[in-house]
Image: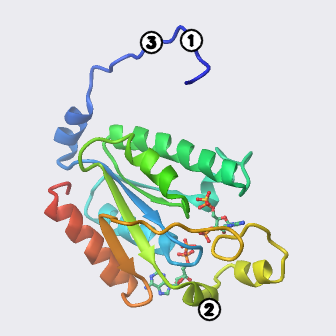
Amino acid sequence: MGKSTNITWHDTTITKADRHAQNGHGSCVLWFTGLSGSGKSTIANAVSNELYRQRINEYVLDGDNVRHGLNKDLGFSEYDRTENIRRIGEVAKLFVDSGKVVTTAFISPFRSDRDQVRALFSGEEFIEVFVDCPLEECERRDPKQLYVKARRGEIKDFTGIDSPYEAPESPEIAIRSDQLSVEEAVQHVLGYLQDKNII
Ligand SMILES: Nc1ncnc2c1ncn2[C@@H]1O[C@H](COP(=O)(O)OS(=O)(=O)O)[C@@H](OP(=O)(O)O)[C@H]1O
Ligand SMILES: Nc1ncnc2c1ncn2[C@@H]1O[C@H](COP(=O)(O)OP(=O)(O)O)[C@@H](O)[C@H]1O
């Protein structure tokens, strides 16, 4: 239950369907999830670049960036991660309502949090993209040198080290980022959107 009372939902004159008709494509959220260093940001950005090139309305919501603003009051406790994902889910819903193909790149380690976000959307609007990469490979890449710090005990509650990651059980898309190139991953995601007639 929310805290606000005496509030009324206002339907807008221009609907999501109107925006789809004007854009000439549908809208959805591509919800990338995976360990730090698995390639969520890299692939989400590459997908967005290709969508932009094809003149499709797109937007990227990235974990590090959102934590600089909207969610700067949140850390990495279980409670804070759940609230982080809840807020991003609501923001993504607004973007989908605005007619965009939105890509999100958050670890989103808990299955129940991702399922709560899924429940905000209808039909095929929520597309879970599991960026599947073994922990050893993420640690080898360590693009931000965070695993090194986590192993030294300088970062607590680090996903995959001393905080859990619950892999998706039936994601719409799974990408082995240690086996596919970024370009191959992009083609895989774009192919899915085309098959579903979203773009
Ligand atoms: N303790 C801990 N665990 C995991 N990640 C950490 C932590 N501390 C900082 N970082 C950096 O924050 C990025 C993850 O933020 P997210 O908002 O995606 O995390 S979560 O979905 O709320 O779990 C993550 O970004 P990515 O590496 O892009 O995944 C890290 O750069
Ligand atoms: N096939 C691949 N897909 C995605 N990233 C890859 C791949 N191969 C190597 N990388 C590298 O792995 C790193 C992934 O980092 P990043 O995209 O920030 O991951 P995340 O957002 O999941 O933390 C980048 O340095 C990227 O260049």
Please indicate whether residue 2 sits to the left or right of residue 156 in the image: left
Q: Amino acid at mark 1?
A: Thr
Q: Which residue is mark 1?
A: 5
Question: In the rendering, at what x and y percent does residue 70 appear?
Answer: 64, 44
Of 14 and 188, nearer the camera is 188
**10 Å crowding of disc 2: few (<14), some (14-19), many (20+):** few
Task: Decide which of tag 1 and tag 2 comes sooner along the chain.
Answer: 1
**Residue 8 got which mark?**
3
Quarter assignment of residue 172? bottom left
Q: Position of residue 14 (x, y in %)?
A: 27, 25
Q: Is residue 28 left or right of residue 164?
A: left
Q: Is residue 93 above or below residue 169?
A: above
Which residue is rendered at x = 57% and y = 78% of the image?
Answer: 37
> Residue at (48%, 45%) from the top-left corner?
89
Q: Position of residue 189 (x, y in %)?
A: 29, 70
C-alpha gap between disc 1 and disc 2? 51 Å
The residue lying at 38 percent from left, 87 percent from top is 181
**Quick one: SS at disc 1?**
loop
Q: Residues within 10 Å of mark 1 (few under 14, many from 20)?
A: few
Q: Which mark is residue 150?
A: none
Residue highlighted by disc 2: 140
> Residue type at mark 3?
Thr
